[in-house]
Amino acid sequence: MKTTYIIIFIVALVIFFIIIFIVALVIFFLIRLIRRYNYNYAKAKGRHGEKLVAQELMLLPDEYTIFNDVYILENGKSTQIDHIVLSPYGIFVIETKNYSGWIYGGEKAQYWTKNMYGRKYPFYNPLLQNYSHVKALHSLFGFPMQYFIPIVVFTDNATLKGNYPRHNVINIGDLNILIKTYQNVVFREDILAAAINKLIYSSFETSETVSNHEAQVKANIESQRRDIMEGVCPRCGGSLVHKEGKYGSFWGCSNYPKCRYTLKR
């Protein structure tokens, strides 16, 4: 009888661990499905925002040439740019953010904050993100930097409350108004036509390009995180030092004011 109880106990124990394993496996796959859904939702939402901006840009006069969702390869790095508008008055480089809620951020801050009903979500500073796009186009065309006009456009669901240049960070309804304020001609017709042709032949998109670009972005983010954990400035390679400021404590680069990287803790 004692042997029977032992066998029953062992069988029950095995069944218990099997159930635990199955439950853990189900939870693991559910988490993966949720993450995949959130990723696809965020991607679809971003695409919708880009579509809204593209439709707005189509209302510009014929002297503006519009490129949407551009991939270029410069210096061995792929760069994805939401919108590029070439005109006699300059090259407008546009980054789109389809976010809702209150948007807070500083021009030099590494991360901005989206506040949705009291819940805060950090995201990478789109001004810095767009600056990398400008540098890629500067390398491609060779034009002076002042000929490029970077603009960050939020859809009308966002309320902009941050400390950033108002002429660079706007809602979608102000986009074409801002573009049309630039009236000083900087490109002759032949130079502008050559630039348009160069962008046509330099831009491309394939499934491999998109996949490689996304992998490159993830690798860059991981590299920045490692630098921060090791007390290294991810922007210039200097040391991160603890500082006290008007709005509390933060980490700043030791190479200030040459490098203005900051990180709130």
Image: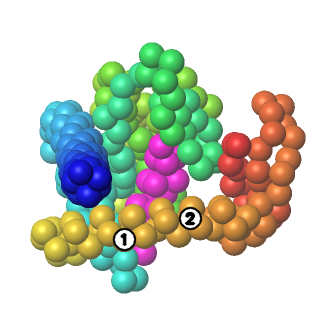
- What is the span of residues highlighted in magenta in the rendered image? 123-142
Give the image location of residue 132, x and y in percent.
46, 62
- Determine the image quadrant of residue 164: top right
Q: Amino acid at mark 2?
A: Gln
Residue at (77% x, 60% y) in the render: 240
Residue 1 colored in magenta in the image: no
The x, y position of residue 76, in whole percent, is: 36, 83
Name which residue lies at 57% across and 62% down: 225
* Number of marks drawn: 2
The spot of residue 102 in percent (x, y) is 47, 22
Left or right? Give the position of 78 relative to 258. left
**Under tag 1, what secondary structure?**
helix
Q: Which residue is mark 2?
A: 224
Q: Earlier in the sequence, mark 2 or mark 1?
A: 1
Identify residue for label 1: 216
- Tell me if mark 1 has few (under 14), some (14-19) or many (20+) residues whose alpha carbon lies within 10 angstroms of its own: some
Q: Is residue 137 magenta?
A: yes
Residue ranking furthest to the top = 117
Q: CA distance from mark 2 to mark 1?
A: 12 Å
Residue drawn at (36%, 71%), measured in percent from left and top?
Answer: 216
Residue situated in front as seen by the camera: 214 or 64: 214
Q: Is residue 217 above or below residue 260?
A: below
